Image (cartoon, grey):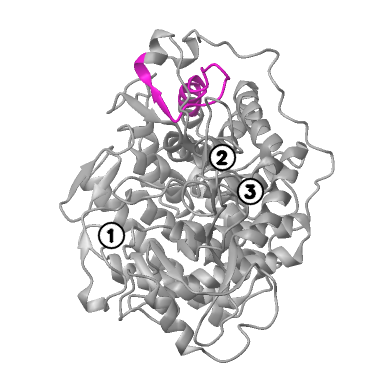
Amino acid sequence: MLPIHKPLKDKKALQRLRPRLAGPKPLLRSRTLFAGLAFCITIWYLTGGFDFDIGGQSSLESVRLEKYMNSGPLSHPYTFVKSSVDWAKVTPRYPPETPFTPIPTPPKKAPFPRIQHQFPPESPEAQQRRDERRRAVRDLTVKSWSAYRKYAWKQDALRPLSESGVDQFSGWAATLVDSLDTLWIMGMRDEFDEAVAAVAEIDFGKSSTPHVNIFETNIRYLGGLLAAYDLSKRQVLLKKAVELGDLIYAGFDTKHRLPVDNIILSAVKSGGGLQSEYQVVSASPGTLSLELARLSQLTGDPKYYSAISRLMSLFHSGQNQTALPGLFPMWVSMATPDVTTGSTFTLAGCVDSLYEYFPKMHFLLSGAEPAYLSLTKGFLTAAKKWLLFRPLLPKNEDVLVAGNRNVDAQSGKPLPIDPETEHLACFIGGTFALAGRMLGSDEDVRVGARLARGCAFAYRSFPTGIMPERLNMAVCREGAAEGPGCGGPWNETRWEEETRRRHEHKPHLPKGFTTAKDPRYILRPEAIESVFYMWRITGEKEWEDSAWDMFKAVERGTRAEKGAASVVDVTVRPEDVEREDYMEVSLNQLNTHKKIKKIY
């Protein structure tokens, strides 16, 4: 994901692939994490349902939900409106090589073990508690969507305090498109039908800005359309996905057939070609694969997959040529092209969704493209060695945190780990656990659990119950090795030394945290997503309880009369919380609700 220091926007990604049952099938969802391909449908098999009066006998709740959402007349009929530009008909300056790389043929036998936990029947008391929690999540989602519908309809995001809308991502209704699958999962049939009707009228030939960011366009819009199509099978969504996919594909019209970071629409229309940037964050080109591969699967057109196949081959061939083999630097060049030169490595903003997509692509393609297995194993091994650490904590809690690592430019030797982490990095716990279960590695599932616990620990440590956007901790031990803690009881002297090293340290911070460099909360879903993964993969109750604690804290901290607002400083007392008229995008709140809802 791309990091946010000011109201820009992060990610990710992704979109998020869902923990699946025994093997892959073509019904895969896409959301950047929220548009993560292949995520929603199987999640619903064990999610629990609603009290829909749809007639007939009781059946599996996911089946009942699908029947309710996909059967019967539409409450909001629509007419498909073609975009003003057909991007597929623009003659490229740099034609792609043909024949296109075909979509790999999946093996006859699914190569993956069962990923989801086999949940036993629950007691009446447990079911009642789950139903109450699920209803609370849905009620808050309805409130948030209603505010968007009233004050920012067809705009990219809601400004909840000023009760207005804003266009941040080309003006194509980012919140509306990227929340389609949320509305479907929540059983909000009328709202979903109305939103689909609005999507049918979006003009992807025009933009509120002269250029469109390929990363944001892919994860928010294309991911949102594909996710909703996989769930609902509304053909208008696939038609719009093709229109947009053709625009993203036009972003590959460069000398090396590698994507630009920003697509200049006028240049594409003229057929003059585009110039790849000499420096972009790794997540920008690296977070295109899931959606474009899925689009090829759904349409049978191999051009989208062929484009990302060339791109990801560059990453695959360079993975072991970097300063930290297995990992990629924060910045890469699509103009040179070069994905190996660089001395800064992280799992957080700028690189995060690049790694997130490796195991999900392996899953989406049913293991038929070996490169993604290699990329996955390589990054997991290197991340455990170079980018994870156990923090120094008062009660010696066995948690892991993702940090950063720099390499000395002259000697080429890795420097000590930088114990700064971000909320964006909280995706990594779920990714480790999903990849570990997929590849049969219990060790990586445990690493994922310790990482998810690290972010859950950060949430409950602060007075608001919410983790800051960016913070520092002190290092107890580098790496992900299991074993004893820091060799003794809490060392107050060492703790004080660590705080003196950080000029951003403030006396009111809880012990264990040396800074809260960016104390905001901008409605990010990464932490709750990893908690969701752990719940689905392990079935352990701690994750269900952690999710509920997070939900209550976020609901309380971001509460606004119209929707939810960002928190200026989560390190202060709840009664002193200030909110700002900014949500990154409204959909981040809805995606957080979606993750919690799927736990219950």
Label 3 amino acid?
Leu
Looking at the image, residue 371 lies above or below residue 278: below
Residue that mark 3 sits on: 327
| Disc 2 residue type (three-letter) | Asp
Residue 502: x and y in percent read: 38, 70
Q: Which residue is mark 1?
A: 564
The earlier-in-sequence mark between 2 and 1 is: 2
Residue in the picture at 44% in, 9% down: 271
Q: CA distance from mark 3 to mark 2?
A: 32 Å
Q: Callout 1: 10 Å neighbours few (<14), some, many (20+)?
A: many
**Element on which disc 3 rests:** loop
Tell me, yes or no, if residue 574 can be seen here.
yes
The residue indicated by pointer 2 is 230
Please give the range of residues in magenta: 241-266
586 vs 525, left or right, is left
- Describe the element under mark 2 as helix, strand or loop: helix
- How far across and down, in percent of the image, does residue 422 sit? 44, 60
> Residue 529 at what x, y percent from top left?
51, 60
Foreground residue among 519 and 416: 416
- Could you say which disc has been placed on residue 105 in the image? none
Q: Position of residue 446 (x, y in %)?
A: 68, 69
Residue type at mark 1: give it: Ala
> Closer to the camera: disc 1 or disc 3?
3
Q: CA distance from mark 2 to mark 1?
A: 29 Å
Q: Is residue 528 magenta?
A: no
Which is nearer the eye, 16 or 448?
448
